[in-house]
Amino acid sequence: MQQKTKLGLVIATIIGSVYATEATAIDLYVDQKTQQIFAEPGPGRTKLGTFQQVDEPNKAGLASEKSELAAQKTEIAKIKQEQELKNTELKALEEHVNDPSLGKVRMGEDGVKWESAEGDFSLKLNGRVQLDSQVSMNQSGVPQSSTLADGTTIRRARLSAEGAMFKEFGYKFEYDFTRGNGSTAGGVTDAFMTWNGYSPLTATVGQFKEPISIEEATSDIQTSFIERNMATNAFIDNNNVFKMGLGLKVAQPRWTAQSALQTESMGNGSGTNDTSSTNSNGNANRNGGSGDTGWGITGRVTGLPWMEDKNHLLHIGASGSQRYLDVNPSCAGAAGPNSSNICGANFGAALDSNVDRSLVLNTGVISNNSLGRSTQTVTRAGGEASVVYGPLSLQGEYLQAQVAGNGLSNNNLNGYYGFASFFLTGESRNYILQPKGNLYAGVFDRIKPNHNFSTTGGGIGAWELLAGYDYLDLNSGIIHGGRADTGKVGLNWYPNSRIRVMANFIHVFDLETTTSTSSSATNVNSTAKVLNGTHPDIFEMRTQLDF
């Protein structure tokens, strides 16, 4: 009985499927006695259920779907293959970049630097450009031929390469395209190598700056005013501070000590070179008329007797130098050296100006063989101090040079300066507590604004106000170089840490230049004589970029 019932259900299902071709659903009934299937109800019939038509699969559509699916599988396989190739290429590129023999290159706020993977070797490219302009005023009564000039100039344009070799050794080479005296287009500034394998000691050999004066040791990129003060220029910078020799430095967070044994400089400095060379290239490529090399020893120590942090500290320091000069016999003459020779001690300074750099204060060459006078030693000494208290800072320095030799006695030249700085935007002067790979210690570094200037981000950069006083006296005994004191104010804008725009206004309070024509006095240029007793004003600007 049960088998017949199952058979009937199967038959009913088949019939229902066929019948459903004309209807979506149908009710089926089974006769209890005969087990026959009916589409209508009746006596003795039981409803089996409602059955819905199920279409047979569309063979054509199914084939299309299979074809489309196969195409998709083919496309997916192709994409996977391309992705695998890309992954392989990226892996090969990554392996190439990480190849220890090639190292890695980084570019950022500190410039472009290449470094080997293990850190044993590195190369960093640096450069700076300083574009200056000057307007000189308040010169009524001064002949046109002697007035301070207006104009623009490229003050400095330098490129340098520095880095490390075998971790313990370092090097730097820098060339200034504007350095020279007219006969040369440029000159070498730094050219040295260092060894720091016995920390915290660093040894330096080559051509580098004398370790003297906080203002001189601080890079010209970071100095507060456009030009260094008159005493710094007269006794250090204008005599070509880059000299050849051996240096030692010990730098700790709270104190530093530096010393150097150096000969005369290589390449040109300013017109006040205290060298014995008659060669237009200074003391590089010395020729038969240049005489023996002069030499000297210089040292500087600094300390931080009070320090809460790098923005609240007191810096003090002292420096000194003893230089022994060789005076070339060809520098003889009652009027000083002839026009083609620059030798012997010679000190001079401009009036804090940068475009017209006339040495208004100028001793002339002190050596004069016809009068039995020759400069044999120059002894320099100085003291320095600086206070940083948040956005406010103060700095002052005293420098002197004692000139001694045949026909000279008790000739002391001196000068000093002081200035105040205040950041309107809250920054502080950036004192270097622990120099790393830096030749100079106990100095100030670049300013990093709290918010870089941006037309979209709303930052205005850093703004600094300055006010200072500057004094230089180049008169002593038979040395008549003149005397001057100036006051100056400044405004510096730092859009970011690598760009700076500066504006300075300088007023000369007193200017005393000698009018002596005595044959026993040192030679003085005509411009200095004409400007005696005047009070010129100077406005100067600088736009600076360094990388």
Image (cartoon, grey):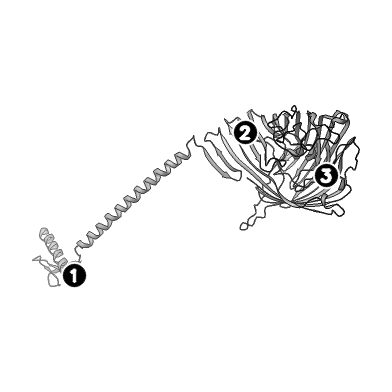
First in sequence: mark 3 vs mark 1:
1
Compared with 450, 480 (above or below) is above
The residue that label 3 is drawn on is 360
* Direction from residue 164 to residue 67 in the image, left or right: left
Amino acid at dot 3? Val
> Residue 27 vs residue 439: left or right?
left
Residue at disc 1, secondary structure: strand
Q: Is residue 335 magenta?
A: yes
Query: CB of mark 1 within 8 Å of CB of mark 2?
Result: no
Under circle 2, the secondary element is strand
> Which quadrant of the view contains residue 317?
top right
The nearer-to-camera label among 3 and 1 is: 3
For the N terminus, the quadrant is: bottom left
Could you tell me which residue is drawn at 63 percent across and 29 percent down?
Answer: 195
**Residue that protrudes farthest toward the left in the picture:** 34
Residue 4 placement (x, y as % from top left):
10, 60
Which residue in the protein does label 2 denote? Answer: 171
Q: Residue at x 65, y 39 (%)?
A: 175
Which comes sooner in the sequence, label 1 or label 2? 1
Res. 285 image quadrant = top right
Which amino acid, by three-letter code, is at mark 1? Ile
**Does dot 3 land on a helix, a strand or a loop?**
loop
The percent coordinates of residue 301 (x first, y second) are: 75, 32
Disc 1: CA contacts within 10 A as few (<14), some (14-19) or many (>=20): some
Q: Which residue is mark 1?
A: 26
